Image (tube, rainbow, N blue to C red):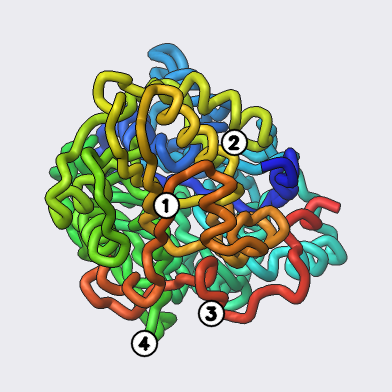
Amino acid sequence: MDNVVSEFISDELHEECGVFGIYDLAGGEVASSIYYGLFALQHRGQESCGIAVSDTNGPKGVVKSCKGMGLVNEVFNPDNLSNLHGNIGVGHVRYSTAGASSVENTQPLVLNYVKGTLALAHNGNLTNAPELKNELSYTGAIFQTTIDSEVIAYHIARERLNTPNVESAVKNAMMKIKGAYSLIVMSPRKLIGARDPFGFRPLVIGKRDNAYVLASETCALDAVSAEFVRDVQPGEIVTIGADGIESDTSLCIQKPARCIFEYIYFARPDSYLDGVSVYNSRIMAGKILAQMHPCEADIVVGVPDSGNVAAMGFSLESGIPYGMGFIKNSYVGRTFIKPKQSVRESSVKIKLNVLKEVVNGKRVVMIDDSIVRGTTSERIVRMLKTAGAKEVHVRISSPPFLNPCYFGTDVPSCDQLIAHNNTVEEICKMLGADSLGYLDGERLSELIAGDSGYCDACFSGRYPVDPPQDDIRGDYDK
């Protein structure tokens, strides 16, 4: 597609991340558990990561941290992990868009202030961060990063000066910030988890012996042998202290707006989000596609990884055999979250290879989770046809992207969305496919067992809260 802009919009606030926290009430070391938890969440961010730990039985306010650019197994090693002594800690994996990929923006953020220390990990995107940052700047705040997580940390620290405990400070800060946030906050003696009232981003609670765990997804609990306890409710604040766990649900609302794209793409298929199996959601998406967009074909293949399960669903519903059409190089990060178009395209070349024996001479149904700009899909269709596929019928397990997202998913501005200014027939021609079918937006609720509390604004334009008047994502650090 010739008219695609070569770079993402500069949207430093706009990130998809993974958070993990643990408090061992028995005093055991937690750094290695955080490492394995982050490893399980690596799919949520591959540009940077970090761990911060403290000892609740040691000197108050001493936090040891290690952060860096790269994958979890690139940043951490036995030597630096062995220096992270403590029984309470928080970790983070992150990706950013163009202009914000720097070590200064890695998390967890660690703040030293008059009441002690705070370490914070954040997944999401605030819609009112520029106003809040401006307000803080005029009262003397000096910012070290260009991420909205620092705005949250400042507000918690300021509220803590006038509140009896850190969980009250978190609650007061939540009443000022707007948008999407799943937070894990470590104070010297407590670990706090908080989720915005709409529940855009997931957050779960686990338990292992005498340790409590907070994480973005249940797959991270499995990685550290923790038992799933429950999801943090949208709007809930959970506080883990020496006496166990406490809950504050006073900010919860009646109708949340969980991000539907978590089920379609972001989450790992072995995770459960708000009681719903991601695997089952993707199977259902494939079945719906087969019902709505049937075709005559010899084999169904999925584009790894998030297209594979939907392809199985399409096969089950249609009776067309499922096959493994691609070999994936697992050491290459997700193409959807690369900062530049040139990087994204070169990644496709080394990320996927077609199994010619599987597709040669056959009519192929290719299942993928989404089409954003179209260049990646066009290249994959071409790869299949070069390998000998007679026909390629593309089926997408999400509706067309028509609107930007302001709540933490990297859906860019409208001018970069192929579906915004092109019909399905035009997109099909651009891809070089023989047919193209998207999931019907009216059937999205079936992916999460009829639960109506979800956000599909990137598809429908129905934002659960008023979006900014301007696309402020690229203006935050100006």
First in sequence, mark 4 or 2: give its number: 4
Q: Which residue is mark 2?
A: 338
Residue 159: assigned label: none
Residue 435: assigned label: 1
| Residue 164 visible in image | no
Q: As shown in the figure, which amino acid type bears the numbered disc 2?
A: Lys
First in sequence, mark 2 or 3: give its number: 2
First in sequence, mark 1 or 4: give its number: 4
Nearest the eye: 453 or 284: 284
Q: CA distance from mark 1 to mark 3?
A: 28 Å
Residue at left offset 62%, top offset 55%: 418
Question: Which image quarter holds the N terminus?
Answer: top right
Numbered disc in front, either 4 or 2:
2
Residue 254: assigned label: 4
Q: As shown in the figure, which amino acid type bears the numbered disc 1?
A: Ser
Q: Residues within 10 Å of mark 4 (few under 14, many from 20)?
A: few
Q: CA distance from mark 1 to mark 4?
A: 41 Å
Q: CA distance from mark 4 to mark 2?
A: 36 Å
Q: CA distance from mark 4 to mark 3?
A: 18 Å
Q: As shown in the figure, which amino acid type bears the numbered disc 3?
A: Arg
When the figure is inspected, residue 20 is found, relative to residue 32, above or below; the finding is below
Q: Which residue is mark 3?
A: 462
